Image (cartoon, rainbow, N blue to C red):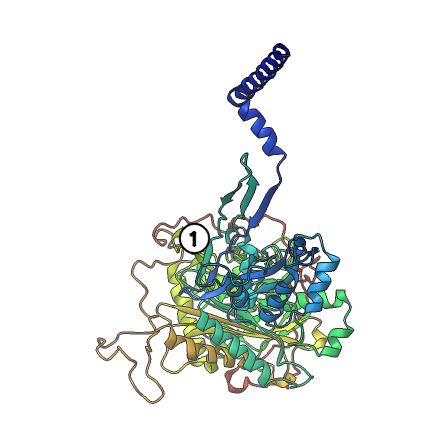
């Protein structure tokens, strides 16, 4: 018996020894392999950590758009519903349900007991039920503190409040609501920019999500690994918040002043304004007459009643929104009218095809059309300077004949008409089919093009080209971003001004600037003059659409000071809501003057002329006699005469570090297929009586301008965003 027992014990010991040996072998030799197999079968928890989208700042660092922390209230219904055995009642109970519901209803007034019970019943096994979305920390703070509260012994006061956690994400906010809405754009779900800088710089503003991984290790312990998110970069714009505010306030006041003038509605169909630095292409402000709250971009209540909104179909609603979201300054096209005349004059000066004077008798018979001047009785003899001062159509038509179609359209290309500016905003309209060329023009088209009819531009296109007329001849690419910085404010990339070409010589620029000074001091732009400042500019009136419809676009583009322009303001008013006899450039000069009056002192532009009261401008008391603040008699040092062969001179001294592309070259990237954008830009003039003068020196639409857009040109439709 003892022998059998001994044998059995020996066998058991041998088996145990073998088992121990096998386990040691597995641990030492195959341990890593088996551990991986076990861990691969464990449950893993993975949670995304959102990145923070970069800010958009104005030129002085004021936040225009940022992403703020918000929290979703998440219920772990399965945990809250967990049952525990109660020894007293000898039953399974859900001890977390009542305390958790009580805490939720106490801390979130809009949460009801019925709502939470419905979630716990209908989604009993859910680990992720969203009870509330996008609450600020102040709204969840009370619950967080209640859940974390401990007594003197360090134990939780509310241990049975379980199964509630807060999912952090970011919400895009715009502190100034409607301010710069057409430039900024907005975002939709998934941090996708819609329109404006939010769209154009979407990839730069966006970052990369992080992730938190949780799993049970081989010892059944929970381990956590975190990959931190990479936040997006911020963009510092060229916008000035205060100038932008001034522009939008003045536009709104204009729309209100002329509201219900002829028809029920705002003071015009649209108003577009751009304020820019003509010396580097920086846009300081840009807006139009249809603004919207960036925090509620789909709200139509600013323009339509509740009944109207309810009556719209989804397609109609989207069309209305797209109309509001469009940026008039880049997406719409129109005929510029007389603001194009300085380009004709500059072309004549550059090619050397000028006269001492032009005889305006009030009418030119061209191509079977009687095309009249704005002053039907005629201006009489006009010098080059007077052709701009008085906005003489007749002189322009004579001038363009002397220039010839080859040189005229060559310089149209040099001034970038028909080409995109490639401003850093989405949706810039194409105009290549809306201008004439040497190959498809005729006598009538050439004549009307000379004073800005029968070809289309965008507002930013003309403002950029005009800047080159007054800054020495340098065409800067218009832009809205000056640098990109990381979340700590470190500069990632500086965006330097880009000179695309030299359009005219410095001497021609100086001459044109003097002519434009005369326009504001003595000519049709007098009503835009701000007392004490030397200013230049040009008025514009354009007929629009079918000539019989009697619709107009009036405009003014001006700059100050004349000697070294620091700021340019371009105002375009589309179909002002006033009687026909009031459709004049004074509408635009009035608005421009209001803007200039406020921004010139703000920009520290010093007065350089005597005021009407006879006071000397500040800082000029000790100037030597004969100094000319307007600075037009004496050409800048190094200025040379035009070649007379159509080639801009002065390119030997471009801004330091600037490479001048070939004359007439397109901005880089213009080859991409353009979006449809714009509106028709032709129209009719008021019926002036024979011999009527220009009242008050303002410019009125001329009569008899034929509608003759380039063959095949279509009325562009604004691009949907």
Judged from the image, the secondary structure of the residue bearing numbered disc 1 is loop
| Towards the viewer: 667 or 298 | 298
The spot of residue 665 in percent (x, y) is 51, 49
Give the quadrant of residue 292.
bottom right
Q: In the drawing, does residue 667 fall left or right of residue 335?
A: left
Return the residue found at the far bottom: 613
The spot of residue 148 in percent (x, y) is 50, 61
Vertical order, 30 against 545 (above or below): above
Q: Could you tell me if residue 690 is visible in this image?
A: no
- What residue is shown at x 52% (from left), y 52% (from top)? 51
- What residue is shown at x 53% (from left), y 40% (from top)? 221
| Towards the viewer: 298 or 627 | 298
| Towards the viewer: 716 or 397 | 716
Vertical order, 570 against 119 (above or below): below
Q: In the rendered image, which quarter contains the C terminus?
A: bottom right
Give the quadrant of residue 513.
bottom left
Q: Could you tell me if residue 705 is visible in this image?
A: yes
- What residue is shown at x 76% (from left), y 71% (from top)? 312
The spot of residue 238 in percent (x, y) is 44, 62
Q: In the drawing, does residue 711 fall left or right of residue 402?
A: right
Q: How many marks?
A: 1
Q: Which residue is mark 1?
A: 486
Q: In the rendered image, which quarter contains the N terminus?
A: top right
Return the residue found at the far front: 1
Circle 1 Cα neighbour tier, 10 Å, few/some/many (<14 / 14–19 / ≥20): some
Vertical order, 689 against 409 (above or below): below
The spot of residue 478 in percent (x, y) is 48, 59
């Amino acid at each position: 018996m003892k022998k059998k027992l001994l044998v059995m014990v020996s066998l058991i010991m041998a088996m145990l020894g073998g088992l121990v040996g096998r386990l040691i072998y597995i641990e030492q030799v195959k341990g890593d392999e088996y551990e991986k197999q076990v861990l691969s079968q464990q449950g893993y928890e993975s949670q995304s950590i959102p990145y923070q989208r970069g800010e958009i700042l104005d030129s002085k660092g004021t936040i225009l758009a940022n992403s703020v922390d918000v929290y979703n209230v998440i219920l772990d219904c399965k945990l809250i519903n967990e049952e525990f055995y109660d020894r007293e009642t000898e039953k399974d109970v859900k001890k977390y349900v009542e305390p958790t519901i009580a805490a939720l209803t106490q801390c979130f007034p809009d949460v009801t007991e019925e709502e939470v019970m419905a979630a716990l019943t209908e989604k009993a096994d859910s680990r992720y039920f969203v009870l509330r979305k996008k609450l600020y920390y102040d709204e969840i703070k009370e619950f967080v503190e209640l859940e974390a509260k401990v007594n003197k012994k360090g134990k939780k006061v509310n241990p049975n409040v379980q199964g509630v956690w807060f999912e952090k994400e970011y919400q895009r906010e715009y502190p100034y609501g409607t301010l710069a809405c057409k430039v900024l754009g907005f975002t939709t779900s998934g941090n996708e920019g819609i329109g404006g800088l939010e769209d154009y710089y979407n990839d730069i503003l966006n970052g990369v999500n992080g992730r938190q991984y949780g799993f049970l290790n081989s010892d059944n312990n929970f381990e956590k690994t975190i990959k931190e998110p990479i936040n997006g970069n911020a963009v510092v714009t060229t916008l000035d918040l205060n100038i932008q505010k001034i522009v939008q306030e003045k536009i709104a006041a204009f729309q209100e002043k002329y509201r219900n003038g002829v028809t029920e509605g705002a003071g015009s169909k649209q108003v577009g304004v751009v304020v820019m630095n003509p010396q580097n292409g920086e846009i300081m402000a840009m807006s139009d007459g249809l603004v919207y709250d960036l925090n509620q971009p789909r709200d139509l209540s600013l323009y339509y009643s509740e009944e109207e909104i309810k009556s719209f179909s989804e397609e109609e609603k989207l069309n209305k929104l797209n109309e509001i979201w469009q940026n008039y300054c880049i997406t719409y096209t129109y005929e510029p009218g007389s603001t194009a005349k300085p380009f004709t004059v500059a072309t004549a000066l550059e090619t050397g095809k000028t006269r001492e004077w032009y005889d305006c008798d009030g009418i030119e018979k061209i191509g079977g059309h009687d095309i009249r001047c704005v002053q039907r009785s005629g201006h009489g003899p006009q010098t080059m300077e007077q052709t701009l001062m008085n906005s003489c159509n007749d002189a322009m038509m004579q001038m363009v004949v002397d220039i010839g179609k080859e040189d005229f359209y060559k310089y149209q290309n040099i001034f970038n008409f028909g080409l995109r500016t490639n401003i850093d905003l989405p949706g810039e309209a194409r105009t290549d089919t809306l201008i004439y060329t040497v190959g498809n023009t005729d006598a009538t088209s050439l004549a009307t093009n000379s004073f800005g009819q029968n070809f289309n531009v965008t507002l930013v296109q003309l403002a950029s080209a005009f800047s080159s007329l007054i800054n020495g001849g340098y065409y800067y690419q218009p832009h809205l971003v000056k640098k990109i910085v990381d979340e700590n404010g470190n500069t990632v990339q500086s965006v330097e001004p880009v000179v695309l070409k030299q359009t005219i010589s410095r001497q021609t620029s100086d001459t044109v600037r003097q002519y434009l000074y005369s326009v504001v001091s003595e000519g049709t732009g007098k009503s835009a003059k701000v007392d004490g400042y030397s200013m230049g500019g040009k008025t514009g009136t354009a007929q629009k659409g079918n000539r019989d419809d009697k619709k107009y676009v009036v405009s003014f583009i001006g700059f100050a000071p004349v000697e070294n322009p620091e700021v340019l303001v371009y105002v375009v008013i589309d179909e002002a809501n006033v009687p026909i006899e009031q459709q004049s450039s004074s509408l635009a000069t009035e608005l421009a003057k209001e803007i200039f009056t406020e921004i010139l002192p703000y920009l520290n532009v010093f007065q350089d002329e005597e005021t009407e009261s006879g006071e000397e401008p500040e800082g000029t008391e000790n100037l030597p006699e004969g100094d000319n603040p307007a600075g037009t008699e004496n050409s800048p040092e190094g200025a040379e005469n035009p070649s007379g062969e159509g080639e801009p001179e002065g390119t030997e001294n471009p801004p330091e570090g600037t490479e001048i592309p070939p004359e007439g070259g397109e901005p880089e990237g213009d080859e991409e297929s353009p979006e449809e954008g714009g509106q028709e830009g032709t129209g009719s003039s008021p019926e002036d009586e024979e011999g009527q003068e220009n009242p008050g020196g303002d410019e009125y639409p001329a009569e008899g301008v034929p509608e003759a857009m380039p063959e095949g040109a279509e009325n562009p439709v604004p691009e949907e965003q």
